[in-house]
Amino acid sequence: MKVKYWIFNLLFAAGIMANACGQSIIDLHSHIITQDYLSFLKDNDALLDEGFPIPSWDMEKHLEFMQKAGIETSVLTMVAPHPYFGNINQTIKEVRKFNDYCAELKKKSNGKFLFCAALPLPDVDAAIKEIRYVFDTLHADGVKLATNVCGQYLGDEALDTVFSVLNEYKALIIIHPHRPSNYPKQLINSLPLALYEYPAETSRAVCNMIARNVLARYNNVKIVVPHSGAYLPLAIKRMQNVYPIFKSRGLMDEIDFQKNLDCLWFDLAGNTSVEIIKTMLQITTVDRILYGSDYPYADANVLTGNANKLRKDLQEDFMLSPYAKMILSENARNLLNGNMTKTAHYDIAENLIVRIAEIEVEHDRLDEYLQRAKDIATVSMDKEKGVICLLPMRIKEKPNHLRILEIYRGEAAYQSHIKTEHFLKYKQSTADMVKDLRLIDMQALNYGDLSKIFRKLN
């Protein structure tokens, strides 16, 4: 299937005009369905494996939808079902063909399309070989993983090696629910997979990874959880409450919930509402929420209406209006980082909060305060990805005069920081040690240079 590239230039220009009328969007959840892949599924009698027909996909129509909805960039992934039907050599061949096509599409798209590559699981060795190929040769933006492949669920010990390699690449991973390996067929006839079992599949796979500390152990990866977190706002809270009982009886190992959760982002595909966003905030922060369309699994006009309604609702919601831009585009730009065609590092730096705290400490409490200042800086930097820098310093000529360089990823990260248990404990315990405190907000004269500082440290 040849890609018609001339259409990009027309719709790219039209998209700029459309975006000028409203907040542009980055879509972290959309799909590409090639004719080659449809033929492969048909040859394996798998077109209805997920319980419903696979929609058609057309590049021009996808671009037209993006233009109307004000979407500047879409991240493409392979649809379900996963291309394994007992012959791993077929799977390897089909996955490579799919990834090569997506890489060509991305290259010619003027930044309109990015892609997360498919992997030929359940063959771990083949998957690792493909990981290195898609990142080193194709420059993929991440990988897509099914919740399970023939019963091999995310979190399975057999996949630890795969996660180790993905961790090496600091990979973005978009997960997507697939049909469970065993399910009541008579129930699915009246209750389609997408209505109940897909959210259950997502929740099951993520909870399994958390139970085995997969994300805590391989914490360079960045996982995008689809469909507004599925059932995780309830499941994770329940897991946290029930876990101590099982652990005390030797039935579960130690789980670092926070370290696992720190690797998770959440897209809004299938439920783009402020009510759902507020529910998701029970287990995440607003800087981890991303827009997702799920195109082409719903009518383009419906999806466009949903996107416009989300823009409007976010702007009108007292709690979420300050974060509308973050949810619609900047969180995704931050997550994708150097893969965006726009100046991603500049945009990220422009959102940073940079502050210098000038502190004068009581002479007789100086040693105690210095220790607490060092402790809060270490804990915050270790536990909070939104805290870029907390660097306590002393003025040499005035030892009890301190300066703390504070850099936060954005307003949401700062608000999250000052509500943490460790910050509140620090604030309360040092209140009577401080004689004077001034917070001075700074503004970089060149945000591009500010971001270079962190790239040079990598």
Image (spheres, rainbow, N blue to C red):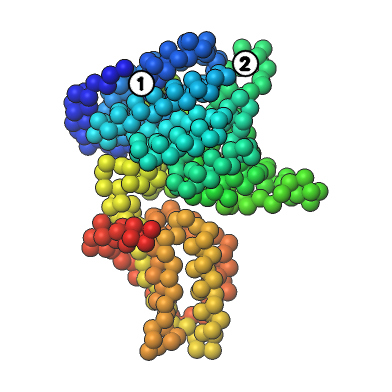
Q: Is residue 369 above or below residue 79?
A: below
Residue flagged by tag 1: what amino acid is it?
Ala
> For the point 38% across and 83% down, which residue is it?
395
The secondary structure type at the circle numbered 1 is helix
Q: Residue furthest right?
A: 249
Q: Amino acid at mark 2?
A: Ile
Q: Which mark is residue 139?
A: none
Q: Earlier in the sequence, mark 2 or mark 1?
A: 2
Horizontally, is 197 left or right of 439 in the view?
Answer: right
- Binning the other alpha carbons within 10 Å of mark 2 as few (below 14), some (14 to 19) or many (20 upward) gives some
Disc 2 to disc 1, C-alpha distance: 26 Å
- Residue where numbered disc 2 is placed: 188
Q: Is residue 223 left or right of residue 350?
A: right
Query: Which residue is denoted by mark 1 in the rendering?
Result: 300
Q: Nearer the viewer, residue 319 or 163?
A: 163
Left or right placement of residue 353 versus residue 200 in this view: left
Q: Quadrant of the C terminus?
A: bottom left
Instruction: Give residue 244's position: percent from left, percent from top.
Output: 74, 50
Q: Position of residue 200 (x, y in %)?
A: 61, 29
Where is residue 124, by image quadrant?
A: top right
